[in-house]
Amino acid sequence: MNSKTSSLDVIFNPRSIAVVGASPGKSGQLFLDSIVACGFKGPIYPVNPAGTEVSGMKAFSSLPEIGKQVDYVVCCIPAPAVPQLVRDCATAGVKAMQAYTSGFSESGSDEGRQLEAEVVRLAREAGIRLIGPNCLGAYSPSAGLSFATDFPRNEGKVALLGQSGGNTSYLIRASAQRGVRFSKAVSYGNAADVDECDLLEYLRQDQATEAIGIYIEGVKNGGRFYDVLSNTARTKPVLVLKGGYTEAGSETAASHTGSLAGSAIVWHSLIRQAGAIRVYTPEQMVDMLVTFSLFPKPRGRCVGVFGGGGGASVMATDELSAAGFQLPRPPKSIRRQLGNLFGNSAGMIFKNPIDISSVGFSNEFYDVVRRALTYGEEEWIDFALLHAGFGQAAWFSAEAFEKDIDRFHEFISRLHNEIDKPMALVLQFLVTNWEWQKAISVERGCSEAGLPVYHSMPSVALALHRFMRYHEKAEARAARPS
């Protein structure tokens, strides 16, 4: 890493932290509690003007009063007081500061822009890397650093960058519910000093990160961003969710983080030509983070679908076929074995999709899938989708299958562990609160077992198409003569 990139190490691996503005009942206490909850091992110093104890910890009235080395400062004080805090950080040898404080360039006022410029000047003169302002800062599970108390403490292999603190928080939580774990994440706000280019360059060289998601509203240097995005996308997958691509959205983005959003056509071309993967909604971003975290790369695009029902199977076929996947008919040997085992049970169709809705979520579901995937010598599919819709479980009441559903995630986990073939679970057609609660329970159990879970057949078809297209393009590049 170059010196500018390596200077970001302290953001993700600080040895000591001070939270300035950590007064009881204020936002600073939330940051303090989050860092403690994530298991930070080094010294944590709360700072508030009164020196009032907070969260059971001794507080200091100012940063200089600490009198010990502080690597990383979380700033939660009013904007006019931030320049003096930066001066105090310079005197104390602080290496990085994250400014939660708003009221800078995003305000649109000359005063806010001038104040931000002064803070950046002071930070750069002192060699302090500044995240923000107007941001939530860094989440680094390996270091025990977090800006929320409920983020997972164990680390994973994907990273997330976001200009919006709210969107970044949502993406972490929604992905974590489905089994994704993060190497690093940053809400970087106005990007007055540390920007998306610095962070992408850092993550491109970070061995703990295998894929990167970024929510971006705009950049200040489009040429540099294109170069950095292209270089990073050649090394590892980069998923881009662009906010503010309409004229009205651009105005909102400017008032949110002070960024230049640009036109929709320019952004679409930039992302495509850089080789990144564009997604259009937070839900699509979560689907892609799930896919790159948990789904092994299949050999090809032949898929077997199990479950659902007659109507659901038709729609599943449409979605998967439209996304470029093939649904081959099972070999005769497999159809014969299933027919001998289950006879002509009403509702069972041993084609592809294999409709086994008549057996519900019982032992027979497990038996059908296991036999179809392990009997015979023919490798007739590259991966499997297990398709369940609780709202379709019966025409009278889904609750009638409660015991079966309670066992369902056990069967799915067993299949996932026993069969050496990529597979995913699709949970959809959820109507009642009861069905949602059951689905969340199943999703959590499967995700904990490392099985990717999706919320609809269109979403899994789109996510896996983008996933396969990324790998197909990467293989084509590798095959070209140098």
Image: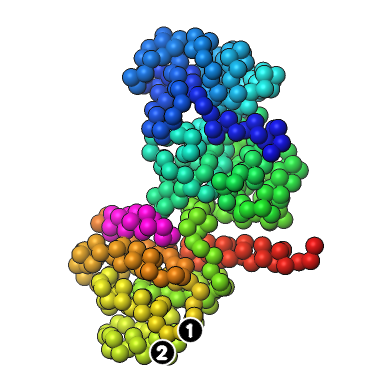
Determine crowd level at label 2: few under 14, some 14-19, many 20+ residues with C-alpha closer than 10 A: some
Q: Is residue 46 left or right of residue 183?
A: left
Question: 225 or 80, which lies in front?
Answer: 225
What secondary structure predominates along the stretch shown in magenta?
helix
User: Vertical placement of 72 versus 363: above or below?
Assistant: above
Q: In percent of the image, x 64 and y 67: which residue is there? A: 472
User: Vertical placement of 70 versus 350: above or below?
Assistant: above
Q: Is residue 448 visible?
A: yes
Q: Is residue 219 left or right of residue 338?
A: right
- Check disc 2 and report the residue beneath it: 333
Measured from the top left, where is residue 108 in percent x and y?
Answer: 62, 27
Which amino acid type is marked by label 1? Glu
Return the disc, 2 or 1, that comes first in the chain's sequence. 2
Q: Is residue 174 visible?
A: no
In which quarter of the view is residue 127 placed? top right
- The residue lying furthest to the right in this view is 482
Residue 197 falls within the magenta-colored stretch: no
